[in-house]
């Protein structure tokens, strides 16, 4: 099942049917046994005209956090970009460490929705999107759903000094989530593929894909570390890292179109822009 937060309300998709839910978003997604509960909410069936319905980011009062260096490809990329600053060893060590890298990413008002703009920094010359499966972890620490995340990153800023990571990662519209919250009956398959396609002036300039089984960390492991010494009253979204990294000579440009797809969830589309 899928939950869409839209301009017309919260819409549940169950197979090929759509239902309008009369409830608050935060209360809904933090419901115990969410999949089982949603299966009982199929009374108010509707016909939905998606051409006349704006899809909002599937977030309300939740924070967005992110995990880093969870794939080997990500470790290698971080080591490459930071080698001149002497920071390469940090990424090698955290990849093999017991404790994962976790960092704050965004508050809800800084998150872009499907078909909205994501921003690149004016003071950065090397910007990339990072396609990531994103967990929704409810207020009790249970992984209750999944969505698609775009963790925008300024590689030259982080590469200059690892202590600049918050500036490389946390700024206006540096994160996108959507188009929906996917609520399967069982946990998502590790054979699931994440893919990304970037177009510039309608021409493809980069594409890549990877399966979740290439990730070193377990989702439950990441969730458990995030919820250590933290309370999230409304739950939290956690981006789980990327295994698809464009080559070092690639950087995003204004007007680029980024499409990130994850099997069974859908496709998140965003256009790249500067904040001003």
Image (cartoon, grey):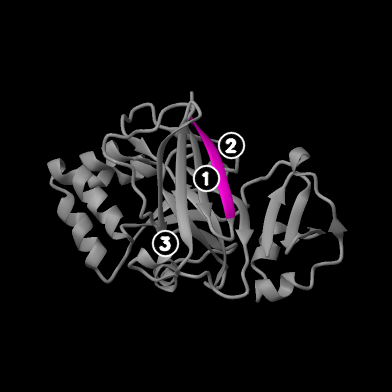
Quarter of the N terminus within the rendering: bottom right
Report, in whole angstroms, how far the alpha carbon at label 3 lies from the one at label 2.
26 Å
- What residue is disc 1 on? 176
Quick check: 208 above or below 92? above
Task: Determine the residue positioned at 75% across, 55% down.
Answer: 11
Quarter residue 186 falls in: bottom right
Q: Residues within 10 Å of mark 2 (few under 14, many from 20)?
A: some
Tell me which secondary structure the magenta stretch mostly adopts.
strand
Q: Which residues are magenta?
A: 266-273
Q: Label 3 crowding class (10 Å Cα cut-off): few <14, some 14-19, many 20+?
A: some
**What's the CA distance linking mark 3 and mark 1?**
20 Å
Q: Tell me the element at label 2.
A: loop
Distance from disc 1 to disc 2, alpha carbons, whole Å, reads: 8 Å
In this rendering, position of residue 43 left or right of residue 272: right
Looking at the image, the residue that sits furthest to the front is 203
Q: Which percent across, then down, holds residue 157?
A: 28, 37
Q: Which residue, given by chain and number where applicable, does mark 2 sit on?
A: 116
Residue placed under numbered mark 3 in the picture: 211
The residue sitting at 21% across, 39% down in the picture is: 160
* 271 in magenta: yes
Quick one: 264 or 55, which is closer to the camera? 264
């Amino acid at each position: 099942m899928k939950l869409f937060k839209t301009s017309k309300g919260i819409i549940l998709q169950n197979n090929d049917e759509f239902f309008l839910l009369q409830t608050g978003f935060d209360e809904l997604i933090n419901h115990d046994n969410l999949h089982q509960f949603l299966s009982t909410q199929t009374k108010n069936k509707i016909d939905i005209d998606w051409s006349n319905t704006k899809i909002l980011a599937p977030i309300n009062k939740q924070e967005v956090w992110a995990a880093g260096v969870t794939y080997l490809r990500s470790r290698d990329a971080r080591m490459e970009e930071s080698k001149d600053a002497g920071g390469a060893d940090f990424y090698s060590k955290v990849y093999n460490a017991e404790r994962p890298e976790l960092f704050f990413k965004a508050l809800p008002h800084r998150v872009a929705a499907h078909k909205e703009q994501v921003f690149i920094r004016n003071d950065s010359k090397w910007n990339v999107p990072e396609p990531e499966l994103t967990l929704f972890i409810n207020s009790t620490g249970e992984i209750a759903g999944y969505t698609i995340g775009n963790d925008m990153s300024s590689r030259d800023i982080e590469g200059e000094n690892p202590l600049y990571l918050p500036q490389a990662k946390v700024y206006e519209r540096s994160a996108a989530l959507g188009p929906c919250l996917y609520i399967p009956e069982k946990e998502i398959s590790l054979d699931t593929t994440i893919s990304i396609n970037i177009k510039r002036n309608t021409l493809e300039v980069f594409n890549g894909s990877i399966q979740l089984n290439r990730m070193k960390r377990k989702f439950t492991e990441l969730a458990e570390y995030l919820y250590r010494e933290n309370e999230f009253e409304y739950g939290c979204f956690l981006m789980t890292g990327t295994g698809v990294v464009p080559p070092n000579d690639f950087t995003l440009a204004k007007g680029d179109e980024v499409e990130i797809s994850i099997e069974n969830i859908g496709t998140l589309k965003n256009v790249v822009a500067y904040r001003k």
